[in-house]
């Protein structure tokens, strides 16, 4: 997992925080858990989820998820009520998949549900930070999970700008992703690399026979040999 270097911790004071993000994949909550532990380990974390889904995945209750009725005025009111109560605690972080549905990262114009905008009006002194997520294949057999933080702003500054801010960060992430600019990111979680199976055994044996170090990562191995794909 790669995260673009960010000024996200440069807060003037200790205030509640709303992280609003796009929603490209089922993996988004898991990515959020990794980021929460990495960047905000001293805070309490909460996130809304459709009530029916919370019943299916009850283990999420213990991770700070709370159920919301989807696509109804009652659900919208419930979200604002619970979210506002959560954010009364200055150590709280509320994570919101602001699109309210799975959506392709290339979908434009970006359309978000109104919840984050309403929270910004209610909580002008809270911090709001856009987060862009994307999953893509580069040189390894498994996908890269990419994340990019936007600039933290107070609620009064993001009113009317929520969609614009998140779309800008998503566009910046897409550019780094398309160009495969690994230098734009810090690696915060490593998964398995290499092709796997007999092929990696053969590559390791060949490297030892040549007196070379074995790089399991496909890209690193190609770079050592001077480029090219196998």
Image: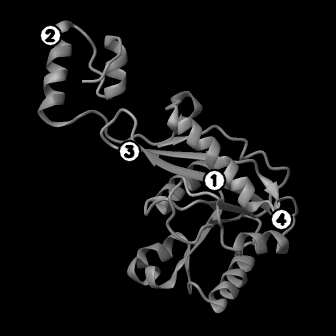
User: Which mark is first along the chain, 4 or 2?
Assistant: 4
User: Which mark is first along the chain, 3 or 2?
Assistant: 3
With respect to residue 20, does 191 lie above or below?
above
> Which residue occupies 73% across, 54% down?
165
User: Element type at marker 1?
Assistant: strand
User: Element type at marker 2?
Assistant: helix
> Which residue occupies 59% across, 32% down?
184
User: Which mark is first along the chain, 1 or 2?
Assistant: 1
Q: Which residue has dot 3 on it?
A: 143
Instruction: Give the color scheme: rainbow, by chain, secondary structure or one colour.
Output: one colour
Q: CA distance from mark 2 to mark 3?
A: 31 Å
- Residue 101 lies, in percent from the top left, at 53, 70
Q: CA distance from mark 1 to mark 3?
A: 19 Å
Q: Quadrant of residue 118?
A: bottom right
User: Element type at marker 3?
Assistant: loop
- Which of the image's four quarters has the C terminus? top left
Q: Quadrant of residue 79?
A: bottom right
- Residue 211 lies, in percent from the top left, at 21, 7
Q: Which mark is residue 159?
A: 4
For the residue carrying disc 3, how many other residues have a C-alpha within 10 Å: few (<14), some (14-19), or many (20+)?
A: some
Q: Which residue has dot 2 on it?
A: 209
Q: CA distance from mark 2 to mark 1?
A: 46 Å
């Amino acid at each position: 997992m790669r995260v673009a270097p960010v000024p996200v911790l440069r807060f003037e004071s200790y205030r509640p925080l709303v992280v609003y993000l796009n929603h490209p994949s089922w993996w988004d909550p898991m990515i959020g858990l990794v980021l929460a532990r990495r960047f905000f380990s001293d805070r309490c974390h909460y996130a809304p989820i459709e009530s029916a889904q919370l019943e299916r995945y009850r283990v999420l209750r213990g991770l700070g998820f709370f159920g919301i009725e989807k696509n109804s005025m009652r659900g919208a009111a419930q979200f604002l009520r619970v979210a506002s109560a959560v954010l009364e605690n200055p150590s709280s972080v509320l994570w919101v998949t602001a699109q309210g549905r799975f959506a392709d990262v290339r979908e434009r114009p970006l359309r978000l549900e109104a919840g984050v905008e309403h929270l910004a009006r209610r909580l002008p002194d809270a911090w709001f930070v856009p987060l862009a997520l994307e999953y893509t294949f580069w040189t390894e057999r498994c996908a890269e999970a990419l994340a990019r933080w936007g600039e933290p702003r107070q609620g009064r500054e993001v009113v009317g700008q929520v969609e614009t801010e998140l779309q800008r960060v998503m566009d910046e992430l897409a550019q780094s992703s398309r160009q495969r600019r690994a230098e734009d990111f810090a690696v915060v979680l490593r998964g398995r690399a290499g092709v796997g199976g007999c092929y990696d055994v053969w590559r390791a044996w060949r490297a030892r026979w040549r007196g070379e170090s074995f790089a399991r990562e496909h890209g690193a191995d190609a770079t050592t040999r001077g480029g090219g794909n196998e």
